[in-house]
Structures are given as C-alpha cells and as structure tokens.
Amino acid sequence: MQGQHLLQNLNFLCSGIVQNLLAFELDTVGLGAKSANNLLAMAQPLGSVILCLCFTGNFQRLRTLGLKQIFTKYWLIALCDTVGGICTQASIALIGSGIFTVIFSSIVVYIATLNRIKFHRDVSKLRWGALLIITSFVIVSAGGAIKGGSNFLDTLLGICFALGATFGYGTVYVLLNDLFEKDKELALRTNAPRISQTFLLLCVALIETFANLLYFVCVVVPMWTPWVAEPMKEKNTSLWYGLGMFILLVVVDGSHMIGFYFCTSFGKVAATSSGVNKALQAAILFVCSHYIFCSSHQRQCMNTGKTIGTIGVVCGVLLYALDTKVVALFGGTGGTDEGGEVIPGTTGTAGRYDALNLPANSATNLIDADEESCVET
C-alpha cells in the first residue's frame, strides 16, 4: 500500500501540473480559445470513463447497477464536478494556468468552512490562521496578475471563475465525504462490499460525459466553424496537432481524477499529503508557466506581486496541512478535535482525519480485491 500511496500522490501532482499547461496551450492554439465550445472541460470526464473502464470488474458492476440508479445516486456530485470543470477552463483561458492554480489552492479554506457548517467539524486556531494567510496572499497574487499586463475585466472574470471552480470541486469533496460515510455505515450493518474509487469515479464521470456529449452534438457541432475551426485557423494550428493535444489532455485528465479519488481515501496521511500536493502544484506550475509561456504571453511572466503571493499561498497551505507538526515543534503534544481544541496525548488531526475530515478508517478499504491487481495509471 505504501507504493500505491506514493504512486497516486505523484500521479495527482504531476498530472495536475501537466493538465493545466496542456489546457493553456490548447487555449493559445485556438482549440480552447472559445470556452463556450466546452471541449477542454469535456476532456476530464471523458478521460475518467475511458481509464476507469480499464479496471477489472468496473464494466460488469456498471451493468449490474444500471444507468437510472447511477443518475439517482450521483447526479449532484456530477453537477458540481461539471461546474468546477467549466469554471476551470474559463479561468485558465482568462488569467492563465499559474494564477488559477494559486487561487484554486484556497480550496482547503472552502472545504474547512463547509465541513464546519455541514458536519460541525471545526479546525484548530492555527489552521484558521493559515486560512487567513491563504486568503490574504490570494489577493496579493491577484494584484500581481493585474499588474502583469492582463486586461482588468478579463482578470476579474478569471478570478471569479477560479473561485467558481473552487466552489464546485470543494463541494465534491464534501459530498464524497457524505457518500463515504453512508457507504461505511451500510457496510457495517450489512457486510456489503464497499464501493471502489475507480467505480465511483466511473459512475460520476458517465453522467458528466453524457451531458457533455449532448451539449457537443446540439450546440458545438452547429457552431464548429466560429468556435473551433476559425480560431485554430487564425493561430495556424493544424487539425492533427489540435487533435493530438486533445487526446493527450483526455488521458492526463483521466489519470489526474483517478489520483484525486485515491488521494482522498488514504486515511491518516491524506490531509497532509493532499495539502502538500496542492501547494507543490501551485508553486511548480507558476514557475513552469513562466518559463514555457512568458516569452509569448506577458501575463504568464513572474513579477513581484505574483512571486510574493505565490510564496504566501504555498506557505499558508503548508501551515494548514502541517498544523499538528507545527504545534509539536513549539512544544505541543496534541491534535485537534472537531471543536478545534487540543487533545492531550493524541497524534493530531493528521492521524484522525483525512483530507475531508473523515474518520481514519472510513475510506481506507475502498479498493476491491480485483482492482488491486490492476496496473495503476
């Protein structure tokens, strides 16, 4: 299991960086220039379906469950995930992949707040301090983006879309929390097998893919020339290059979602690893965007505001994820309970909750036996 943890965390980290760079590249070559064509947002659920069907047993389970039951159970998760995907691509098109990821790293703020409201699970005072740090430096980062040659209205809209992506994906975290809790209770009462990560992802992604394909056929195909063909022609982009990059994005997006679902079910280390992972994505992507796109896109270049904001956000996310270690460093010995108070003699929230503040054992045994034998993507 240690190898699988490392593999999926590396998958989540690397694919998260690459998917944003690919999305921005497809924007610049015209394929994603018109966000209304929804092609880049469609890549994520489509890739998830294709890759998840490669896992042994998922197709048979899908036939057993039936499409009606899938929609009834998972439509809200699919809706929030779709909103997150659309907002992500619109934000990247407006403000670039670097600043988007910095703003999106504040998703931990939203998750903590929603968990407190919905599940009455508070975080420690140190973590709330980290949330204030993250929020403050997001504003500094946004200011750096405005000064970096971006149009003010585009930047403002891009920031709003990035916050919309945070809302959509953050809500998915909390909805998965509720689903995993119910699944655990059902398993305890009836000894029923627990749902696997890839099968859950397959169910959610199927709903999204159906909606996206319906939109593609009814809206995008009639508008193909002004929304896709003309923007690509203006950028002198060949059809084969655009198609190849899109297929690559589909694979990377699907792999990223598999890594995401696995990383939210790793129990004790999930809070720390997910927080560090997201911080690393923010830091590495900003630097990558600068070196890859700065020469042709001024808004991707580093400046003082972006640099200070990025460092501040990364430090805030790390402080949020590593709060118990920081407490121990200064002589503390406890963690935090749901009310945010220190519990003497415990190992802290990192030992009691995962990234969703779930009980430690609620999502650690979700992998079916036949799935463990599959090659991970």
Image (spheres, helix red, strand yellow):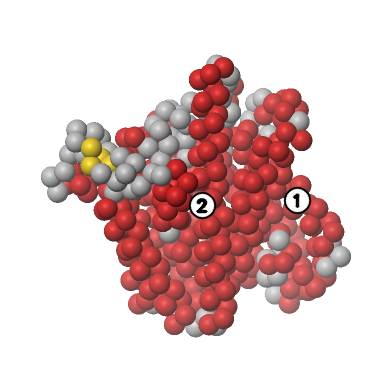
> Which residue is tagged 1?
211
From the image, which quarter does the N terminus lie in?
Answer: top left
Is residue 196 something one can see in this rendering? yes
Q: Image check: 356 left or right of 206?
A: left
Residue at 54% from the left image edge and 31% from the top image edge: 182
Give the image location of residue 266, x and y in percent: 43, 35
Q: Label 2 is placed on what type of residue?
A: Gly
**What residue does disc 2 label?**
170
Tally of numbered discs: 2
Residue 123: percent from left, percent from top = 33, 48
**Which secondary structure lies at badge 2?**
helix
Which residue is nearer to you in this view: 346 or 284? Answer: 346
Task: Examine the image and state in which quarter residue 230 appears.
Answer: bottom right
The percent coordinates of residue 42 (x first, y second) are 69, 54
Q: Give the CA separation, mark 2 to mark 1.
A: 21 Å
- CA neighbours of label 1 inside 10 A, class few (<14), some (14 to 19), many (20+): some
44 relative to 227, above or below: above
Please name the amino acid that badge 1 sits on: Ala
**Dot 2 or dot 1, earlier in sequence:** 2
Where, by quadrant of the figure, is residue 245 drawn? Answer: bottom right
Residue located at (37% from left, 37% from top): 353
Outermost residue on the top side: it is: 191
Q: Nearer the viewer, residue 17 or 42?
A: 42
Cβ–Cβ under 8 Å for marks 2 and 1 = no
Q: Residues within 10 Å of mark 2 (few under 14, many from 20)?
A: many
332 to 192, vertically: above or below: below
* Quarter in which the C terminus is drawn: top right
**Residue that appears at 61% across and 51% down:** 81
- Across and down, in percent, residue 53 comes to 68, 34
**Direction from residue 69 to residue 199 in the image, left or right:** left
